[in-house]
Image: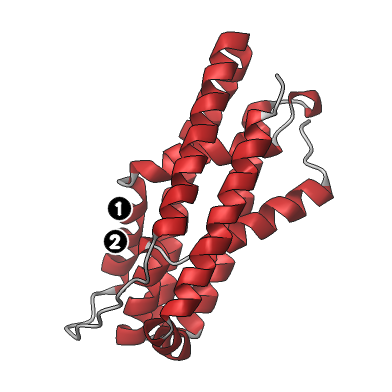
Amino acid sequence: MSMIPPETALVFFAASALLALTPGPDNIFVLTLSALHGRKAGLLVTLGLCTGLIGHTVAVALGIAALFQASAIAFTILKIAGACYLLYLAWGAFRASALQIEAKPGVPPSGWQLYRRGIVMNLTNPKVSIFFLAFLPQFADPARGSLTLQLIMLGGIFMLAALFVFSGIAALAGALGSWLSRSSRAQITMNRVAGTLFVVLALKLAMTER
């Protein structure tokens, strides 16, 4: 039975929550819909986004487990690719400017439409799978047992972190939406923090041994 140490799970949860807080398409989408149509709308989209993460988690867990078991060369290629992608994300985060949040009122979508929109938005974003491919393996250890099970557990923790953060955004949409739309400095600071985290994770991944 695979077991992730509590301290590893806590660090992973904290990193996941910080990444979920970084201004991006998903949380800005939750924020905007919540500000326009209320907290319930934001929560339904959040549930959809988190449901979509299940597909990415399973796909990445199975793929990574196979690569880890294949050969040292496959592992090295995965490690280098993951580190390069994290550095690319860091570069983008450091260069990112504040996002413009545009609120256009309209007819509120139904609950099912909001939930489905969240699922489709997440599943059709290949960057999520690529990010999981680079992020999750750093917190797994073959010595603890099944890599597939560990990665699925980490994906579940990431979903909980995203659910926690996005639900908070939905609940505080009015105040937070107004603050983020006014405070470009806050957005830029969050992007810089995320960029630094990406660099640290890239270095950690590059030094990982099979």
Q: Nearer the viewer, residue 124 or 100?
A: 100
In the image, residue 187 above or below residue 10: below
Q: Residues within 10 Å of mark 1 (few under 14, many from 20)?
A: some
Q: Position of residue 101 (x, y in %)?
A: 30, 77
Residue 117, which numbered label?
Answer: 2
- Residue 176 at least partly seen: yes
Disc 2 versus disc 1: distance between alpha carbons?
5 Å
Report the amino acid beneath label 1: Val
- Relative to 210, 131 lies left or right: left
Disc 2 + disc 1, Cβ < 8 Å = yes
Q: How is the image coloured?
A: secondary structure
Please give the name of the residue rendered at 59% of the width and 46% of the height, measured from the top-left corner.
199
Report the amino acid beneath label 2: Arg
SS state under label 2? helix
SS state under label 1? helix
Q: Using the rendered view, name the quadrant where residue 39 is placed.
A: bottom left
In the image, residue 76 above or below residue 148: above
The residue tagged 1 is 120
- Relative to 3, 95 lies left or right: left
- Residue 71 at least partly seen: no
Q: Nearer the viewer, residue 2 or 133?
A: 133
